[in-house]
Amino acid sequence: MIESKNNNPEDELISSIGDHQKILYESLIQNESAVSKIGNQRLLLLASELAENIEKNAPSDWVHREHLRAKFRVRIKRTLRRYNFPPDQQNSTMVGIIELAVELGQKVDRIKR
């Protein structure tokens, strides 16, 4: 096995997470104020928690049921607050996460069938 000369622990962490977490992480790091305030490692943890939340709590029909969408939005907001995500960026980030959640939820639903 050939080892990279630039053994960056952060790169190793990113390579060790799943596809859903990577998609969410890449979405979160687009927000520069979040990266500077929270840091990449905590954003990785946030992405992992959000992906786990989507996989566990997003039934296939949640997109069509307003009360389930509302509960999901509340979970996302609480998670973002718990990680001290910049308040000025929470709404736009939440919209992006919901869009990704729809896609990921459909994939998870297909896998479960």
Image: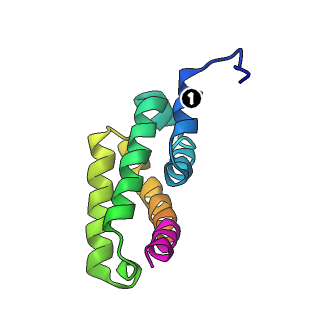
Measured as percent of width and height from the top left, residue 32 is found at 54, 36
- Quadrant location of the N terminus? top right
Q: Is residue 17 left or right of residue 79?
A: right
Residue 4 higher or lower than 91, as above or below: above
Q: Nearer the viewer, residue 99 or 58?
A: 58
Q: Which residue is more in the foreground, 2 or 64? A: 2
- Residue at the (32%, 37%) spot, across then down: 84
Q: How many marks?
A: 1
| Three-letter residue code for mark 1 | Glu
Instruction: Please provide percent x and percent y for residue 79.
Output: 30, 49
Query: Where, by quadrant of the figure, is residue 39 drawn?
Result: top left
Residue 45 pos. (x, y %): 39, 39
Q: Main secondary structure of the magenta part?
A: helix
Residue shown at the point (26%, 52%) measured from the top left: 78
Q: Percent x, y for residue 87? A: 35, 45
Quadrant of the frame with the C terminus: bottom left
Q: Quadrant of residue 85 in the image?
A: top left
For the record, the magenta segment spans: 103-113
Residue under the image location 33 percent in, 74 percent down: 69
Residue designated by label 1: 12
Which residue is outermost to the front?
Answer: 1
Identity of the residue drawn at 43% across and 73% down:
112
